[in-house]
Structure formats: structure tokens, C-alpha cells
Amino acid sequence: MANKKRLTQTLIDLIRIDSPTGEEDNIDLEVTRRLTNLGFTVQHDSFNNVIATLPGIGDPVLLSAHLDTVEPGRGIIPIIEGDLLKSDGTTILGGDCKAGLTIILEAIESVIQTGMQHLPIEVVFTRAEEGGLVGVHNLDFGLLTATRAVVMDGEGTIDRLTLSAPSQNIVSINIEGRASHAGLEPENGLSALILAGQVLTRLPLGRIDEETTSNIGRAEGGLKRNIIPESAYLDGEIRSRNNNKLEEISQTFLNTCKEVETEFTGSKISVEIRNSYKAYDINPEDTAVKTVSCALNKLGLVPEYAKSGGGSDANVFNETGITAIPLGIGVQSFHTKIETAILSEVCKGAQVCEHIITGN
């Protein structure tokens, strides 16, 4: 049975190791040390993702979480308040995804400590998840044999299973106008920022329907207040759990930019749209879902089947043929300074994980 005191200390220890995206070496060393001490064979692929294996009896199961955190995530001071773990309010907590790492490590240690028979276990700890699922996109899947996975990276309670998540297209829009002195001859200029405004007001943005969203999250342009801006840049995304809708909205983005370019003589607007990850939709009757649901039932929990508007490493696992289910990790308010881990929920996560890897 998972040891809450040990689990809490592990979580605090991992949180205290800074690991913003691109700086995962120190947390890598720590989890590699812990997995090696638990008897795992630990490898790193060409992207330095952690891949660890432990023999067992039966069909292998994959457990995954990511090593990196978002900013501000340096010098985190974890504070316990009863059953809650928070930062001091100047940083994130880093529960996303240190709680996921902790759940997996505690579950494995508990099972090994008690000498229980277990399935073959494969562990993947990816880098650069927060940077656009870069680590899992570069994962060496040839080192894995499991066809089912549990991804410990969901917000909320452990009984939340994310069975559906969207595709994401990344949108980059470069806009070129014509520079001119704003005071001497503004009529000779063509403001790239005005062009950007035209694009923004015509694009379908926000909640488009229950399955689909789009956003322009960053806009840049101009050099000085006395120069008609020559260039501008818009950085955005489109998400949908329906790939046909994703393509429809993507085409609307292209058409809108072409429309503005045609309307404003002398302008040039180029659009790059690339896919970041594919949608998945797992049937509740799938064997992998039933396995996780059964583990939850043994703790008296009823699974909540959820649909997400965000992506995770599970999207890429599912795309490659591994049925991967993200579970809640007992953490609330991801990516904020009020991020909070509910320690009893994190402990339940380890208990669920124990049932999954023992097959009991």
C-alpha cells in the first residue's frame, strides 16, 4: 500500500529540483537514480527521454509522466497546509507534472517492497512536454513493447479519465506592409498592424463549437512610434476533437488572410499551418479503460470519463498505436501560482497505479 508520508517527501524533493522546459538534466538524474535503485534497466533515447523497464509476468503496461515544468518554476518553496501542498505564491508549485512522477515512483516502490507479483513495467518520463509535446514526438518507440499506457498528467482527481482530446494546428502569420515616416508622409505607408487588425477581426476566434476552439495568443509588430510599421506577426492555434472541423477552420484562416492581402494593395501575408498532435477518442469499452476503471473501483471510486480541450503526451502515444489514458493526478490550477496538490488524492493515484501494475 502506498506510503503517504514517503510519497509526500518524494513530491517535495522533486518539486525542489528546478526543471523548466529545456533544463531537465537534474530531475532526470534524480528519477534515473530512483528507478535504478528499484531494479529498472534505464535507457535514454537520442532526445534524452527516460525509458526504463522492469521484467514481470503478463502483458506489459506503460506508465508515463513528463519531467519539465512551466515558468515561473525556479526556486520553488513547497508549503504543506494540512492535506494541501502549495508554493509560497511567487512561483508555480510544479505539481504538473512532479505529482505524476511521484505517483509512478511510489506505486512501483510499494509493489516491489511488498514483494507482490507484477506485470512487466515500462516507464517513460519525457522532456519538453510543455514546449509542445516535443519529447514524446522524438521518443524512440522501438524501445517499447506495451500496447496500453497510463499517462499521469491530468488535472483534477484521480478518478478523471480523459478519453477524448483534440488535434492541434499551430498557426504562424507573417504580415508585410510598407514603412514610412509617420509624421512626414504617413500616406505613403501601409501599416502592418492595421493589416493584422483586419485579420484578427475577421478570423473565427474563441469557442467555435463544443469540439473546436481557436486563438491568436501573440501579436508583434512595429519598431518605433514614428514609423508606420512594415511588418507584424501573429502566433495562434486551432484545436478540435473533429479533424474535419480542424481542417475547415484552418482553411478559413488561409482564406481570410488571402482576402485581406487582396483587399490591401501592396500587402503580403504568408500563413504557415502545421499539425502539432492528432486527436484521439477512446471507447469506454476498451480493455485499457476497463483495467483503469477496475483499479478505481477497488478503491471505491467511480471513473469519470472526460473530454479535454488540451493535448498531452497521450495524443502521440495513441497516434502511434498505444492506447494511452491520462488520469488526474490530484493537482488543481495547473500553470498558476495558486497551483495546489491534494496529498490524499496524489496518494490515491499511487494506489490506483499499484492495482494497475499488479493486475489485481
Image (cartoon, rainbow, N blue to C red):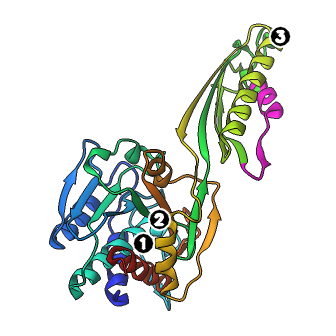
* Dot 2 crowding, Cα within 10 Å, few <14, some 14–19, many 20+: many
Q: Nearer the viewer, residue 36 or 89?
A: 36
Say if the magenta span includes residue 202.
Answer: yes
Horizontal side of residue 245 vs 32, given as left or right: right
* Residues at marks 2 and 1, CA–CA distance in whole angstroms: 22 Å
* Residue that numbered label 2 is attached to: 288
Amino acid carrying label 3: it is Glu
Q: Nearer the viewer, mark 1 or mark 3?
A: 1
Q: Is 221 placed left or right of 46 in the picture?
A: right
Q: Farthest bottom residue?
A: 82
Relative placement, left or right, of 48 versus 250 is: left
Residue receiving disc 3 = 187
N-terminal label among 1 and 3: 1
**Residue at 46% across, 70% down:** 95
Q: Tell me the amino acid under the disc marked 1.
A: Ala
**Span of residues in magenta:** 194-211
Q: What's the mark number on residue 257?
A: none
Q: Nearer the viewer, residue 336 or 213?
A: 213
Between marks 3 and 2, how big is the CA–CA gap?
64 Å
Residue wearing tag 1: 99
Question: Quick one: label 3, few (<14), some, or many (20+) residues within 10 Å?
Answer: few
